[in-house]
Image (cartoon, rainbow, N blue to C red):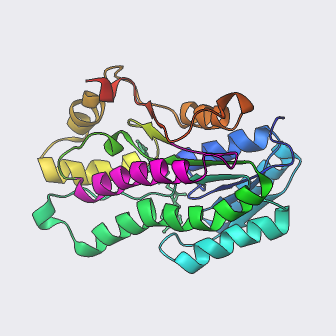
Amino acid sequence: MFLKGKTAVITGSTSGIGLAYARAFAAEGASVVINGFGDAAAIETTRGELAAASGAAALYDAADMTQPDAIAAMIERAARETGSVDILVNNAGVQHVAPIDQFPDDKMLAIVQINLLSAWYAMKAAVPHMKVAGWGRIISTASAHSLVASPNKSAYVMAKHGLAGLTKTVALEVAQAGVTVNCISPGYVWTPLVEAQIPDTMAARGLTREQVMNDVLLAAQPTKAFVTPEQVAALALFLCRDEAKAITGANLSVDGGWTAM
Ligand code: NAD
């Protein structure tokens, strides 16, 4: 349990990849702060499971990632109620798929706020705590779309490329403070977010569900297999180890070879 005594705040962790991060950190003894939307009873069950797994605190914070004040308040609450903010994982994300001339402005703004700006506000609030402690790990879930583009994903690709740039910049700023800043760029991971974009992609490209799965999603992945949330979380866990302290400012692909093409 190498994270005993440490606290991890994971945005967007009520499902998918974020929940896998929370489970991985809790299994190593970390206090965790989970965040995101969902059924209140299900979230409470998850919170209880995390506390039981870690033997440490597990908090739920409902901060909406479109609200800067709520993001800062979540970080301060984590520090107050658990004693520190050692690990920040910027993971909350949403998607919308449409050609740019049919892309609703409000959907574009929500993607930029949730997938990019929330990470900036969370880092701004968490870095002072990490500097004082002389140790910290900031990990953001970017995407293969932080490195390459796909049609109909202008807002998402814009936000994820921005997240990769933010990662590099803050890594340089805290390089001598014992804090590393990296992003992980998964290919297609089988989560509710991917499931939800299938109908839009069917509509945008006039394809069947099977064609979207095989010819659009897995078409990009040479392994022809979805990445699992646990594979992504395992890399995040490694980044928290002392052996990983020289890894900073990196954009680490977990994409079945997608961006090698
Ligand atoms: P998911 O839909 O399962 O999880 C998204 C999480 O974000 C949920 O907990 C949701 O409640 C939360 N969220 C959404 N809007 C929010 C808001 N306004 N405030 C707070 N929380 C909010 O999706 P996922 O696939 O696990 O995605 C997690 C991250 O991984 C995202 O940043 C996504 O872009 C990225 N990603 C996913 C894939 C994939 O194939 N699934 C690939 C690359 C990157």
Q: Quadrant of the N terminus?
A: top right
Determine which quarter of the picture holds residue 210: top left
- Tell me what residue is drawn at x 47 percent, y 73 percent: 66
- x and y percentages locating residue 188 in the rendered image: 38, 37
| Residue at horizontal 58 percent and vertical 34 percent from the top | 247
Q: Is residue 222 above or below residue 182?
A: above
Q: Is residue 186 left or right of residue 58?
A: left
Report the residue that reaches farthest toward the right: 55
Most frequent secondary structure within the magenta stretch: helix
Residue 224 position in % (x across, y down): 34, 22
* Residues rendered magenta in the picture: 153-182
State the residue at coordinates (54%, 37%).
229
Front in this rendered view, residue 175 or 201: 175
Is-magenta flag for residue 172? yes
The furthest residue to the bottom: 69
Out of 129 and 99, give the one closest to the viewer: 129
9, 195: nearer the viewer: 9
Is residue 117 depicted above or below 193 in this figure?
A: below
